[in-house]
């Protein structure tokens, strides 16, 4: 009786708004906002600042909704991993149903506002990205295949594509290349993390590559994806959609990425230093590459670059 | 319910109401701005 009374009292307490905010994975969202904004700024053409702000807000809300749905679905798995046990649902600070409703509300609102304020092509891509992350990746493939990260990379690759299409209202090669860059970048980025956070994933039974195929295969795949990323990162320059500033930066950054992936391929380093260094650099890589893409586009538009 | 729990309940309710109110106000202003911009298209 005492336990029941305590539980009902706990559930009667209104959840803190910060816990709802935490459901949106704010740290991941910062990357989503950044890449979405870069796609929007690098795209040819212009969008009124109010509409540009709305497009980015919708991308962020859509990502937040998908993240909330991901946490709702994975609450039981999150309880098993040290990294995620403190999240609002496994820690018991939020009701699961509230998280689900919050995620659905954010997702529906983001797509509706995007369609009404910008156009329905951008809204359709946003809806696709939410379904891709919350359903295809989280519910279907993540618990089933060690290729989950490769496929999941697609979900994170949507923001620059949506940002670009919000301006142009058409899907061309360049936004697809931006999608491909993040798609190819995600596996080495995430597997480098998985190599030094391996035990947690094994405990939760998630078939992460190092758990299922072993470290050797993971290290080889990290290097393969790092090498494959080079031509894709350089492609915007090669097809003439980006200038020399971007081309030089893409070449240097991509070669550095491969250079840091080689020691990871070679084998376990002391205290997983090589893996941690690659993981840290991968974040810098993406921020720098997209920032330079925007700088290149803005300078070219100002007539300061060819 | 103890006085501390009562105070916590009130604090949570107040802060959540403020956030919901702020979000509603923000979206009202945003929709107004979007309407003005789209009318000029």
Image (cartoon, rainbow, N blue to C red):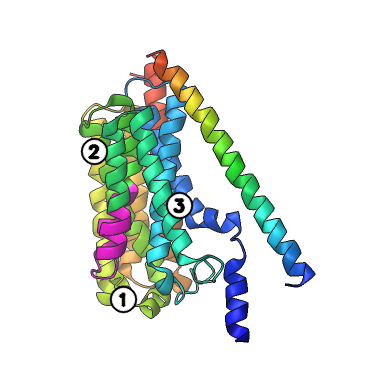
Q: CA distance from mark 1 to mark 2?
A: 32 Å
As displayed, is residue A73 above or below residue A294?
A: below
Identified at 45% across, 54% down, the residue is: A102
**Residue on which the image places disc 3:** A28
Around disc 3, counting alpha carbons within 10 Å, would you say few (fewer than 14), some (14 to 19), or many (20 or more)?
A: some
Identified at 27% across, 48% down, the residue is: A229
Q: Secondary structure at mark 3?
A: helix
Please state if A76 lies on the left or on the right of A216 as rendered: right
Q: Magenta segment range?
A: A132-156
**Residue on which the image places disc 1:** A211
Q: Looking at the image, which is closer to me, A300 or A160?
A: A160
* Chain of the residue under the numbered disc 2 shown in the image: A
Splitting the image into 4 quarters, where does residue A148 fall? Answer: bottom left
Q: Position of residue A157 (x, y in %)?
A: 31, 46
Identified at 23% across, 69% down, the residue is: A145
- Circles 2 and 3: CB distance less than 8 Å? no
């Amino acid at each position: 009786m005492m336990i029941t009374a305590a539980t009902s009292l706990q559930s009667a307490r209104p959840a803190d708004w910060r816990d709802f905010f935490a459901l949106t994975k704010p740290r991941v969202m910062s990357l989503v906002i950044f890449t979405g904004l870069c796609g929007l700024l690098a795209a040819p053409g212009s969008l009124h600042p109010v509409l540009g702000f709305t497009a980015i807000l919708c991308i962020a809300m859509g990502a937040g909704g998908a993240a909330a749905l991901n946490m709702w679905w994975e609450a039981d798995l999150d309880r098993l991993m040290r990294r995620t046990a403190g999240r609002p649902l496994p820690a018991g600070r939020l009701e699961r149903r509230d998280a689900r409703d919050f995620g659905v509300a954010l997702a529906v609102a983001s797509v509706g506002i995007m369609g009404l304020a910008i156009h329905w092509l951008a809204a359709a891509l946003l809806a696709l990205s939410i379904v891709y992350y919350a359903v295809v990746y989280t519910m279907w493939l993540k618990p089933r295949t060690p290729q989950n990260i490769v496929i999941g990379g697609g979900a994170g690759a949507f923001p620059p594509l949506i940002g670009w299409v919000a301006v142009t209202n058409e899907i061309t090669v360049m936004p697809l290349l931006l999608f491909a860059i993040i798609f190819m970048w995600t596996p080495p980025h995430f597997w480098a993390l998985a190599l030094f956070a391996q035990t947690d994933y094994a405990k939760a039974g998630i078939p992460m590559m190092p758990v299922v195929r072993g470290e050797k295969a993971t290290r080889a795949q990290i290097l393969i994806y790092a090498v494959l990323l080079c031509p894709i990162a350089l492609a915007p320059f090669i097809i003439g959609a980006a200038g020399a500033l971007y081309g030089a930066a893409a070449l240097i950054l991509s070669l550095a990425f491969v250079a840091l992936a080689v020691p990871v391929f070679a084998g376990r380093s002391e205290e997983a230093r090589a893996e941690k260094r690659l993981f840290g650099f991968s974040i810098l890589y993406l921020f720098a590459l997209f920032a330079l893409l925007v700088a290149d586009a803005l300078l070219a538009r100002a007539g300061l670059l060819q | 319910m103890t006085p501390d729990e009562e105070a916590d309940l009130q604090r949570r309710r107040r802060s959540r109401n403020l956030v919901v109110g702020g979000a509603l106000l923000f979206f009202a202003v945003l929709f107004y701005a979007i309407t003005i911009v789209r009318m000029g298209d």
